[in-house]
Amino acid sequence: MERKIKTIDEMLEETRQKRPEAYEAIMKEVETRKKKFEHGGKRQGAGRKSKEITKVTFTKRLLPETIAVLKDYAKEHDINETEALEIAISKLRQA
């Protein structure tokens, strides 16, 4: 004999008919949990603002000495390595 698996809706209906007080308690809990999730989520204007300038990831291999110079320059001027590289490239453009 094959046994049928009941759906949640079927189980709820059976509970409603046989044990109305339990059904009411279940439905009350469902409503309470729904209310908990009404806040948050996507909101217009929420989250990190996008930058006006879009940057692209650029991965290349360099000599260790070149990287050391870049890191030292960044540390001396209290900037990150990306900014140091951008300054170096802008100086190349000016030359």
Image: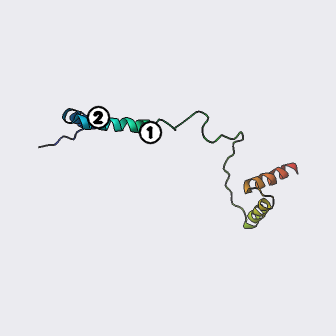
The residue lying furthest to the left in this view is: 1
Q: Nearer the viewer, residue 3 or 69?
A: 3
Residues 95 and 38: in front is 38
Q: Are marks 2 and 1 in contact (CB under 8 Å)?
A: no
Residue 71 in view in this figure: yes
Label 1: how many Cα within 10 Å (few below 14, some 14–19, many 20+): few
Quadrant location of the N terminus? top left
Find disc 2 in the rendering and name its residue: 24
Amino acid identity at mark 1: Lys
Q: Quadrant of residue 34?
A: top left
Q: Which mark is residue 84?
A: none
Residue 85 percent location from the top left of the image: 76, 55
**Residue 4 in the image: x percent, y percent?**
18, 40
Q: Front-most of 77 and 89?
A: 77
Q: Mark 1 = which residue?
A: 36
Q: Position of residue 36 (x, y in %)?
A: 44, 39
Of pointers 2 and 1, the one earlier in the residue sequence: 2
Q: Relative to 32, is 72 on the left or the right?
A: right
Q: Nearer the viewer, residue 43 or 23?
A: 23
Residue 7 at least partly seen: no
Q: What residue is rendered at 72% in x and 67% in y? A: 64
The Cα atoms of the two marked residues, 2 and 1, are separated by 19 Å
Q: Left or right? Give the position of 81 relative to 91.
A: left
SS class, disc 1 = helix
Residue 5 lies, with reference to residue 70, above or below; the image says above
Q: State the residue at coordinates (85%, 52%).
A: 91
Residue 29, quarter of picture: top left
Residue sitting at 47 percent across and 35 percent down?
38
Q: Secondary structure at mark 2?
A: helix
What crowding class fits label 2: few (fewer than 14 Cα within 10 Å), some (14-19), or many (20 or more)? few
Q: Position of residue 15 (x, y in %)?
A: 22, 36
Q: As shown in the figure, which amino acid type bears the numbered disc 2?
A: Glu
